[in-house]
Amino acid sequence: MEFSIEAWDREDRVRGSQQHVPVSLPEQAFCWTRQPTSEGGQYLYGEAVGLRTYVDPTPLLPYDLNDGYPAAYIRKPDPDDAVPVDVIVYGAALSGLEAAGTSVVTFRNNLNKLVGTLLQPADPWVIEGALLLPPEEEGGGGGEGTLYLEIVKQPERGGGAGDQNDRFTYYG
């Protein structure tokens, strides 16, 4: 089954752009910590030392993602060292988490980028997605399935793209 942007856009127009999107509080299902590159850069599943405390963003809304930039931004030594979405999938499998009924899997900061920023063709990032249907529907049954989203940085195109990459990283 191939995802159709035209069909999605048509359905979105029918529902209306002001449709309420339900958002629930995050719930920890599993965790991991990534070692620094100097220590091997391995993922330690089940290790919570790198886990940050959740802060409810509701009192902060509406919020300008540019607030504090560039003064509060600290560039990481290797900004292209991204964590792929399959780390979430692998961790969920290790934890025994049941994926049935899950509609979207991605990192929380990816949702900031998807919802809080306008898509510009010149932006140094793209959204890659894979819609996986349950096994009984793989023959084209048209069921719900789970959408896996990953934001992938593109090579810098010159003309200030470094600043765009820094801003993109700061938003996340």
Image (cartoon, helix red, strand yellow):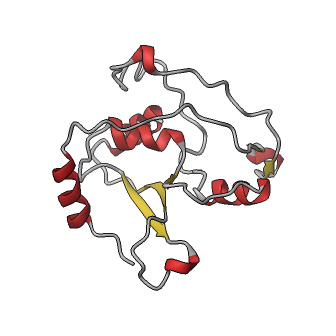
- Quarter of the image with the N terminus in it: bottom left
Residue 58 horizontal/vertical position (percent): 44, 19
As displayed, is residue 54 above or below residue 139?
A: above
Please tell me which residue is depicted at 31% across the width and 36% down the height of the picture: 20
In this orientation, which residue lies closer to the viewer: 143 or 122? 143
Residue 151 horizontal/vertical position (percent): 45, 53
Report the number of numbered marks.
0
Please tell me which residue is depicted at 43% across the width and 63% down the height of the picture: 129
Report the side of 124 relative to 16 (left or right): right
Residue 24 horizontal/vertical position (percent): 51, 34
Query: Residue at the top extreme?
Result: 59
Please tell me which residue is depicted at 58% across the width and 56% down the height of the picture: 85
As displayed, is residue 118 above or below residue 41?
A: above
Q: Quadrant of residue 68?
A: top left
Report the side of 66 relative to 119 (left or right): right
Residue 106 horizontal/vertical position (percent): 52, 50
Report the side of 156 relative to 15 (left or right): right
Please tell me which residue is depicted at 57% across the width and 51% down the height of the picture: 82
As displayed, is residue 89 above or below residue 71?
A: below
